[in-house]
Image: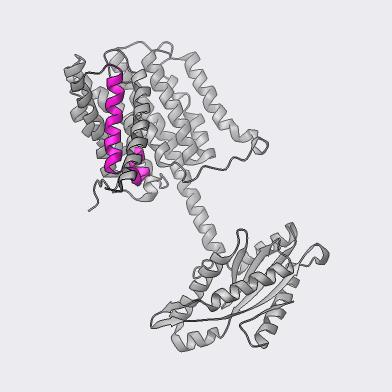
Amino acid sequence: MPGLTIIPGPMHAQWRAGALVGLLVFGACMLGIVTRPVGFLAAFWPANALALGLMTRFPRLSVAGGWVGAALGYMAADLLTGGQWLAVLWLTAANMSTVATGALLFRRLRRSDLALRHPMSVLRLFFVCVAAAGVATLLGAWANPLFFGRPLVDGIAYWFSAELVNCIIVLPVILTLPDRPPAWPGLAALRPRRLLPALGVGCSVGAAFLIGGPGAIAFPVPALIWCALSYGIFGTAILTMGTTGLMLVAVSAGWLPDLQTISFLHETLSMRTGVTLLALAPLTVASINTAQNDLLRQLDHAASHDALTGCLNRAATLAAGAALISRAPPLAVLLIDIDHFKQVNDGHGHAAGDAVLACFGREITAQLRQGDLLGRLGGEEFAVLLPATGASDALAIAERLRRHVEGLAIAVAHGTLQITISAGVATAGPENAAALADLLRDADKALYRAKGDGRNRVAAA
């Protein structure tokens, strides 16, 4: 059964994880301490959600050094701002209980849920946050009567609401962080229409500060939902965190006009509940929209790819070839046929034939350059599309592929098989432009010439 795992890891990895997590948690704590009202806990405390997100999103940080670094980050921030040792240790233990509980529960979720790419992902995230906030409250709420001179009941309400809202608004940003930074298209490529949802959020937040009142926190909801439909889950998570975090600080600092109508505690609890629900709305829409887009991409992939080999199917290959030849000649086409494939099926069975086709598709795809395309035209016949490739380069690529296939040992049920291929090469360029059908016909003639000359060879049109 999965549980909370603290990976030992090499010593240098321990130090690196501890330093990184510790510094990030320390910075997040200092940000939270700045928002702490006199006599209360912090209004915005992103440190726990940040630490939990880092441990979950980057398992290599969930080592002993990472956990020690997080604890030291909490303690250093409180001690540097005048905290007493007993209070610091108590609050650190409560904060770490949030991270540990959340990490334990997140390990039981699927990868798609952690990335918020399932229609129910946000609901599952919410339940994990509720559980983590509840466990932390059992310990953290006692800080209210022990160190702040406030009632325990107020501590329970304040701590639970704080943990819940901070996890809801910070965790999605960490969990949906892309593996690679998105490519910057440049200012010239930015379309003003793409900025409108974000500008809408800015305008609605400005209106909330100008108008104020109890309904002010709901002003950004339509704009955030617009962002959810326009930017995807990560962009929506960033905008939601920025908007809701600003609202939390604004309530604590009294920046929203005409809002001080009830006690500070009741006002804060009400506002945190509202901010939590505000954050859930666009995140849910973005999660559902992302899941829908993933399904559409899967459907498109299934419709355009051969299930056995993973390469393009015949229709998609012909469509891609027509687009390439009309857009950017020169274009080279390799028609490839697996030699004596019928003998493989007859002598070793169709399962062995499927294994040969699947291996061939993987190996050829791995040998191609970025931008080259492999398609299965039918049976054991394949086409390789080589954009911006002249005749001599195409022949060299075809020969390299032939040698690579010749050296393969393909595992089948009762041992291994070796195969060879024959290939026909045809090219079209600015000086000899041709339709795709003509190019395929020329490559087909060259392929049959290669087979007629003894197979396991390459011929040019």
Q: Quick one: quadrant of the C terminus? A: bottom right
Task: State whether residue 429 appears in this view.
Answer: yes
Left or right of residue 300, residue 161 in this image = left
> Where does residue 332 sit, x and y in percent of width and height?
70, 67
Colouring chosen for the image of the structure: one colour
Residue 320: image quadrant is: bottom right
Residue 249: image quadrant is: top left
Residue placed most toward the observer, 286 or 356: 356
Residue 169: image quadrant is: top left
In the rendered image, residue 56 lying in the magenta stretch gets the answer yes
> Where does residue 185 sit, x and y in percent of width and height?
62, 40
Residue placed most toward the observer, 455 or 312: 455
> Where does residue 112 sit, x and y in percent of width and height?
39, 49
Taking the spot 57% from the left edge, 63% from the top edge, the residue there is: 304
Residue placed most toward the observer, 177 or 154: 177
Taking the spot 48% from the left edge, 53% from the top edge, the residue there is: 295
Task: State whether residue 128 appears in this view.
Answer: no
In the depicted structure, whether residue 1 falls above or below residue 95: below
Looking at the rendering, the stretch of residues picked out in magenta corresponds to 53-82
In the depicted structure, whether residue 217 falls above or below residue 11: above
> Where does residue 331 sit, x and y in percent of width and height?
72, 64
Left or right of residue 48, residue 382 in this image = right
Taking the spot 55% from the left edge, 79% from the top edge, the residue there is: 406
In the rendered image, residue 426 lying in the magenta stretch gets the answer no
